[in-house]
Amino acid sequence: MTPTVSASGLSLRYGGIRALDDVSLRLTRGVTGLLGPNGAGKTTLLRVLATAVPPDRGAFTVLGHDPGTPRGRQEVRRVLGYLPQAPGFHPDFTAFEFVDYVAILKELTDRGARHREVRRVLAEVDLGDVRGRRIKKLSGGMRQRVALAAALVGDPGFLVMDEPTVGLDPEQRMRFRELIAQAGEGRTVLLSTHQTEDVAMLCNRVVVLAGGQVRFEGTPAELTARAAGRVWSSTERDPGALAGWRTGTGSFRNVGDPPPGAELLDPTLEDGYLLTLDDAGAEVAAA
Amino acid sequence: MSWHVSEEDLRAYARGELAPPGLWSADAHLTACARCRGVLADVSDPAALDAGWERLDAELDAPRPGLFESLLVRLGVADHIARLLAATPVLRGSWIGAVVALLVMTVVVANVGPSADTPTLFLALAPLLPLAGVALSYGPALDPTHEMAVVSPMHGFRLLMIRTVAVLVAGLGLNGLATLALPGYGLRALAWLLPALALTATGLALTPRLGPVLAPSLVGGAWITLLLAAEAAAGPDTEGPIAPFTATGQGVFAVVAALAVALLYAVRDGFDRAGGNAA
């Protein structure tokens, strides 16, 4: 599939910390999950791709536009929807007014057309009935949907979302996942998360980032397959395992290099992710 | 009905050319007035009428703008600019109230304090208010949507300028009103204006390099240091204004303001990013 977003050699330092280290990736239509532990560089990568901060080195294109020039950057921003990690709101605004404000920033200056677009995106995130309510009176899940509505203004071709399901209760999380899946139809979505369930349920591609470097890029099935033959069950925690935890049945689920004769289990995406992080840690230690 | 929308306005409405606030009045009136709806039907072609009803439906659905926004639109500000300004933190009532309170206190001190040739306290304070107001109107410190604004197609410098002009109009207007309360000083009471423009422009011009907190803080600190130095150089027995408020001093501030504006324009792209500095 033709890539819609291509990045090559992106590097960025914050102070003495290497937040991104030679990151290259190619995104296609659909939802790509960006997995990684805290401090992996996920937010930094998203902010770079959203043109909020420039990389020290490297380049990228979004839907054919190069943000390296002011004109190219503006073109990227015209096709971009961005939901930051902690979206801020003007608390006295209603949901409608806030999305209207973002629509103005997105160059929709004609009042009638703008208001139609605001109504459309609020309906799309199922907030049409509370559009006149002040944001400070909305629940956390509703606020997150307001932020998603704002990101969807103008029908962007590239949607960047930074941990949008954090802080939501299970019901709200499921509702939000449905919205993300809906938003991923026909556009490129990059979804940062540290929850493997998000990726398993939503994404057709996954990128694992650790220490500012890409450690895996492929499909969720390929990431899961990395753990094939490396997950086993035992009655006690296996000291040789990289990670092990007691499951609901009382037995231990171990991940790592199994001992001979171990009772192997079907791997999950989380197993593949844990092993990928461990491999990344081993590489860093060896270096 | 005590009034009806004129046929001319109804024709403009049908063409989608009636601008706010007349548009809002027509929207509200048409929902309740069968006669005007009849006239509208007569002057509209069916396709345009359908579009008009769709627009009316959308307008009635939209929340009414707040007092501040409505006032701006009635003053002739485009509705989308009014919405941008309504999101400017330092144009909110609490900030304006604090500035007014500070100015009133300063004016009172100038009027009842020991006699002097120049209301130095007022002249020292007045330039700092627009500097602080503009510094706080753009950037991550007080604007919760700053990151979203930075990655929007509207250039950060344009948003900054829209807010700067509004804050300057409000800030300089309040300073001007305070000046009217010092009639005894004549034109000398206006000696804050050029320093205010110079400080504000310099603070903004340095922001891309130094950040939205350090830049105005340094400029404000430099202003206070300059005044203290000028006061010390003048000595206690000197009559007349201290150096910054003399004709020569005012000329220097005019030059500084012009240079800072030129520098600000040169570094305008620095407001187009979020990382670690102004934007």
Image (cartoon, coloured by chain):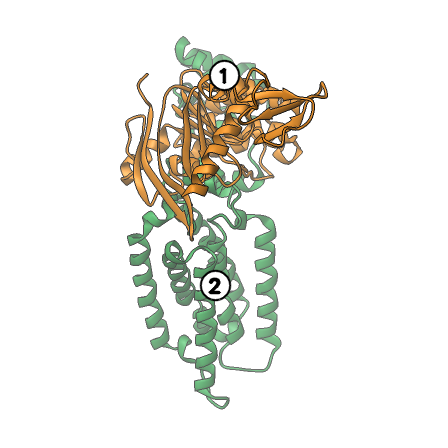
Amino acid, disc 2: Ser
**In orange, which chain?**
A
Q: Quadrant of residue A143?
A: top right
Q: Colour of chain B?
A: green
Q: Are marks 1 and 2 in contact (CB under 8 Å)?
A: no
Q: Is residue B92 visible?
A: yes
Instruction: Work out which quarter of the rendered image holds the C terminus of chain A and state it.
Output: top left
From the viewer's side, name the closer residue of A113 and B278: B278
> x%, y% of residue A77?
36, 33
Amino acid, disc 1: Gln
Mark sitting on residue A182: 1
> x%, y% of residue A224?
49, 20
Q: Is residue B159 left or right of residue A278?
A: left
> x%, y% of residue B4?
52, 23
Vertical relation: B30 (above or below) A283: above
Which subunit holds the residue at mark 1? Answer: A
Vertical relation: A175 (above or below) B271: above
Q: Which residue is mark 2?
A: B217
Q: Residue at x 40, y 35 (%)?
A: A50
